[in-house]
Image: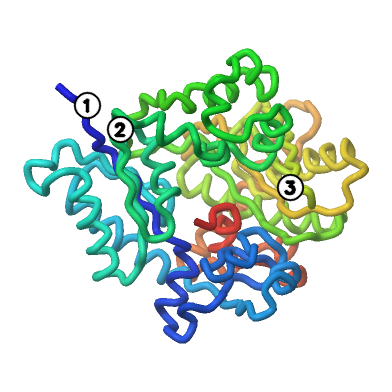
């Protein structure tokens, strides 16, 4: 029995900018960007000039003098994103949403109801355009990996179906950066070895890739270059980590910038941890410099934490270490915090009153418990009156021209 391509990857085109053009028809056909000091998302008209997410607003205006910046409407993004997912669920219950504007679908069990996978993809695109007013690109393939690549090649507003018999012929001529997980740093490292296409990656000995990229990453990319992807559609996910990031444009490195940004990120991450009754032992920070080089630092703590101030202090120590190791770098474009090794923590476990040092950062001490209790009080007020009702003065980013919380993740995904 022949294997059929039954995995769909649907990705709304330039979603945030498309929504803004939908809400304000006068913006249609014009180069626009969501954001201000930093481009969070750009329309295809702006992308034609080289404008992209994560770019500083000044540089974006240099590339495209007629660029119009617009504020974001997160409520509308969420509403329309949910509406599109509901359309997909009309065709199959096996929908794996991986962001606000993209999802995988397994339609193998729906062909007797709605026709072939390409026919379903065509109908989904029509309904999204007619009912939500938005363009969506869809890739249809045998694996999740290939379906996602196909949807990227189909952009903007297109459909590509990859026949299982022609997978490698389709895949290997494509640029290597289309592989999920190949970012600017990995792309540069591969290019230095003469690897610019997926086909060139496929014929590179796996040991060489492991030497260039590390054993785990090298082995994974080698498998994906041959379309070896056994992953199935996952309709539910248990978060392995909780994180947040701040795209800063291009700012001079300073202690004040680092402290304010990390305190703000820690507030967001820790609030989400407590809302899920979770705490985490491993704290990881990421620093991205002006030339797109990123460095990470992490530490695994003896006890899981979820207090905002403790997380901020640990993160600042890690960022300080990263900056110290790169004294030649003068500008930073992004800071990020994530917490992993999560444990269930509906209530704080107190320690015995033994003098062990570092009282402030150990969650079960009297000092640590006081910090946790303060956070819980803040959470309660925010739950009742909204997030802006109360907060920590030290995490206010208004003086730094902060990007609103809801849009920070957009700078990393601008498709």
Q: Quadrant of residue 137?
A: bottom left
Q: Is residue 25 left or right of residue 355?
A: left
Residue 82 image offset from top left, x and y in percent: 32, 60
Query: Residue sitting at 22 percent across and 26 percent down?
Result: 3
Question: 83 or 316: nearer the eye?
Answer: 83
Question: 1 or 327: nearer the eye?
Answer: 1
Residue 402 image offset from top left, x and y in percent: 69, 67
Q: Is residue 266 left or right of residue 291?
A: left
- Mark 3, Cα crowd under 10 Å, few <14 / some 14-19 / many 20+, is some
Snapshot colouring: rainbow
- Mark 1, Cα crowd under 10 Å, few <14 / some 14-19 / many 20+, is few
Which comes before the other along the chain, label 2 or label 3? Answer: 2
The residue that label 2 is drawn on is 142
Secondary structure, mark 1, is loop
Which comes before the other along the chain, label 3 or label 1? Answer: 1
The residue that label 3 is drawn on is 292
Query: Residue sitting at 54 percent across and 71 percent down?
Result: 45
Q: Quadrant of residue 190?
A: top right
Q: Could you tell me how far apart the alpha carbons at marks 3 and 1 are, in whole angstroms? A: 41 Å
Discs 2/3, front: 2
Query: Residue sitting at 29 percent across and 56 percent down?
Result: 85
Instruction: Name the residue at the bottom extreme.
Output: 26
- Mark 2, Cα crowd under 10 Å, few <14 / some 14-19 / many 20+, is many
Residue 115 visible, this orientation: yes
Which comes before the other along the chain, label 1 or label 2? Answer: 1
Residue 283 visible, this orientation: no
How many numbered discs?
3
Q: Could you tell me how far apart the alpha carbons at marks 1 and 2 are, in whole angstroms? A: 8 Å
**1 and 2 marks in contact (CB < 8 Å):** yes
Residue 3, labelled with which disc? 1
Secondary structure, mark 2, is loop
């Amino acid at each position: 029995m022949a294997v059929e391509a039954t995995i769909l990857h649907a990705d709304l085109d330039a979603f945030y900018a498309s929504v803004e053009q939908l809400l304000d028809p006068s913006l249609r056909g014009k180069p626009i960007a969501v954001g201000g000091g930093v481009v969070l998302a750009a329309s295809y008209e702006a992308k034609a000039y080289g404008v992209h997410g994560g770019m500083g607003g000044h540089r974006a205006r240099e590339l495209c003098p007629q660029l119009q910046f617009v504020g974001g409407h997160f409520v509308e993004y969420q509403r329309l994103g949910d509406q599109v997912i509901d359309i997909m669920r009309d065709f199959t219950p096996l929908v794996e949403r991986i962001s606000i504007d993209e999802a995988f679908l397994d339609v193998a069990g729906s062909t007797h109801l709605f026709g072939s996978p390409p026919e379903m993809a065509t109908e989904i695109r029509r309904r999204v355009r007619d009912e939500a007013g938005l363009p969506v690109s869809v890739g249809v393939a045998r694996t999740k990996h290939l379906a996602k690549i196909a949807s990227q090649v189909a952009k903007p507003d297109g459909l590509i179906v990859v026949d299982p018999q022609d997978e490698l012929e389709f895949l290997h001529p494509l640029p290597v950066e289309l592989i999920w997980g190949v970012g600017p740093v990995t792309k540069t490292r591969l290019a230095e070895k003469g690897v610019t296409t997926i086909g060139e990656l496929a014929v590179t000995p796996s040991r060489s890739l492991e030497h260039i990229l590390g054993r785990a990453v090298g082995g994974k990319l080698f498998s994906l270059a041959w379309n070896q992807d056994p992953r199935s559609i996952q309709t539910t996910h248990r978060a392995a980590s909780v994180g947040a990031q701040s795209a800063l444009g291009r700012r001079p490195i300073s202690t004040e910038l680092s402290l304010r940004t990390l305190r703000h990120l820690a507030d967001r991450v820790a609030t989400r941890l407590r809302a899920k009754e979770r705490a985490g032992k491993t704290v990881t920070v990421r620093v991205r410099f002006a030339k797109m080089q990123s460095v990470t630092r992490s530490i695994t703590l003896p006890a899981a934490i979820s207090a905002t101030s403790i997380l901020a202090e640990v993160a600042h120590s890690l960022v300080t270490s990263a900056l110290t190791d790169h004294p030649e770098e003068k500008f930073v474009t992004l800071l990020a915090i994530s917490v992993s090794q999560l444990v269930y923590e509906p209530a704080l476990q107190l320690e015995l009153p033994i003098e062990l040092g570092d009282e402030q950062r150990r969650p079960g001490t009297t000092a640590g418990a006081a910090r946790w209790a303060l956070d819980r009080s803040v959470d309660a007020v925010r739950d009742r009156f909204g997030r802006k009702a109360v907060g920590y003065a030290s995490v206010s980013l208004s003086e730094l021209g902060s990007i609103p919380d809801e849009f920070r993740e957009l700078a990393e995904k601008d498709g």
